[in-house]
Amino acid sequence: MSNVVSYTEAAQTVNAYARGLMPVDGRVCVPLHEAAGRVLAEPITADVDQPPFTRSTRDGFAGRAAELSSQEWLTVAGSTHAGELPPGALPVGSVWEIMTGAAVPEGADAVAMLEHVERESNRVRLTALRVLKSGENLVARGAQACAGEALLPAGARMETGQIALAAACGYGDVTVHTRPRVAILAPGDELVPVEATPRPGQIRNSNAPMLAALVEAGGGEALILPAAADTAEALDAALAEALKADLLLISGGVSAGKFDLVEPALERLRARFSFTGVRMQPGKPLVFGEVQRAMGSALPFFGLPGNPISSAVTFLLFGATVLGALAGLCNAGPRFAAAQLARETDRKAKPGLTRFLPAQCDFNPANGALPKVETIGWHGSGDLPSFGRANCFLVVPEETGSLEAGAIVRILLI
Ligand code: AMP
Ligand code: MG
């Protein structure tokens, strides 16, 4: 009962499935400085107005815009720097010396920049022809947020801006979702552990650490299962172990070969298959579905193709979406970006296949130009030396023949 779908159909199926998932049970409180990459289980709310007082954004003189714009000399009634509060309201006909970040006194509605005034002993005036608008160079109390307002929803991922915001709201620690446990099973008679020296005919199991890294980057906790041989018994035993996880990734054994025993093993667990192949390259043998567990929830699984580049790209496109949803992320999914193609590429059209070609993108080209991407010559999806030079995949949509140099293309970020 094979069910091969287009890339678009596969993405729709996985996205719809992910939308129906609940985050895994459990939440933990982590110190804010360790929260990077974690997903909020509770919203971050403002404890006070932001900013908490009307704040100057410049060094200069706080005053009434109308008075300052009249170019009249105004008395400097006092001075405050950041961290101080002005003692009272600003008297009419005067200004208040103020530093960046300091509280603006009551009555003032603008700040004249130091560079824009003339000073003469204890009075200042705006330089000729300058005018000041009400609200200039200050941020009014509560302009960014009001006390009690939710500023980040549950499901937001904590990155730079979110950590700074939580800190400003007084969160020394934050409540985040427990990370989903992702079992990684890499069966194959030819595979030996990374530390071992392969005998003729053997290769090292590179997918397990690669997938573990992708899982950790995607907000999960990787559980690498012991290597399994290409036998039904070994697979059954390994899968029994994997049933404890929240998501299962199996790499290899999903093609049509004689020792591709993963699908039959999943069938023995009465798995429901959403699709058993995708019209994409690499990654065609990808399998997705779920196993109903005796007690409770279903276990989603991906049977990723064994070739490392195929495994990586199918995880990034599909696996990361399900992982993100289980991690509680409100916007889980692959990350695409636009880049300019450096050289003409992909003359050999592959009708009906969406292609993801290992590529190198220069994200910092000279003269502020758009990121420039070019594909990396490769000997198929097992070519790790080529993959080692890649930092993204060039997306070649279905039915695209060649892409001209200079074309704006989509890339999948790794
Ligand atoms: P399979 O899907 O099992 O037929 O594997 C396809 C190709 O990927 C074969 O060349 C395998 O040797 C290779 N492969 C499978 N699993 C791994 C792995 N864990 N690490 C590195 N290469 C693998
Ligand atoms: Mg195999």
Image (cartoon, rainbow, N blue to C red):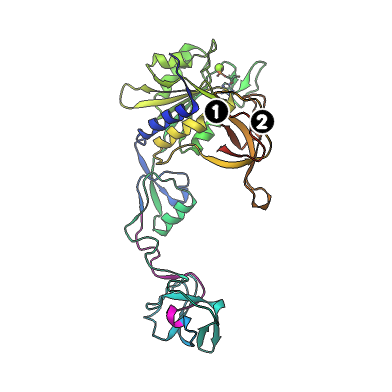
Label 2–label 1 contact, CB within 8 A: no
Q: Is residue 21 above or below residue 259?
A: below
Q: Identify residue type, mark 2.
A: Ser
Nearest to the observer: residue 156 or residue 75: 75
Residue at screen point 47% across, 53% down: 161
Q: Is residue 220 above or below residue 308?
A: below
Question: Which residue in the protein does label 2 denote?
Answer: 386
Where's residue 50, x and y in %? 39, 63
Where's residue 245, x and y in %? 41, 28
Nearest to the observer: residue 320 or residue 369: 369
Q: Is 101 a magenta residue?
A: no
Q: Secondary structure at mark 1?
A: loop
Residue 399: image quadrant is top right
Using a 10 Å C-alpha cutoff, classify the residue at mark 2 as few (fewer than 14 neighbours), some (14 to 19) or many (20 or more).
some
Q: CA distance from mark 2 to mark 1?
A: 24 Å
Where's residue 231, x and y in %? 50, 12
Magenta segment:
45-67
Residue at screen point 33% across, 56% down: 149
> What is the quadrant of the N terminus in the image?
top left
> What is the quadrant of the C terminus in the image?
top right
Q: Is residue 2 visible?
A: yes
Q: Which mark is residue 398?
A: 1
Nearest to the observer: residue 266 or residue 407: 407
Q: Which mark is residue 344?
A: none
Q: Is 66 a magenta residue?
A: yes
Query: Viewer-nearest of labels 2 and 1?
Result: 1
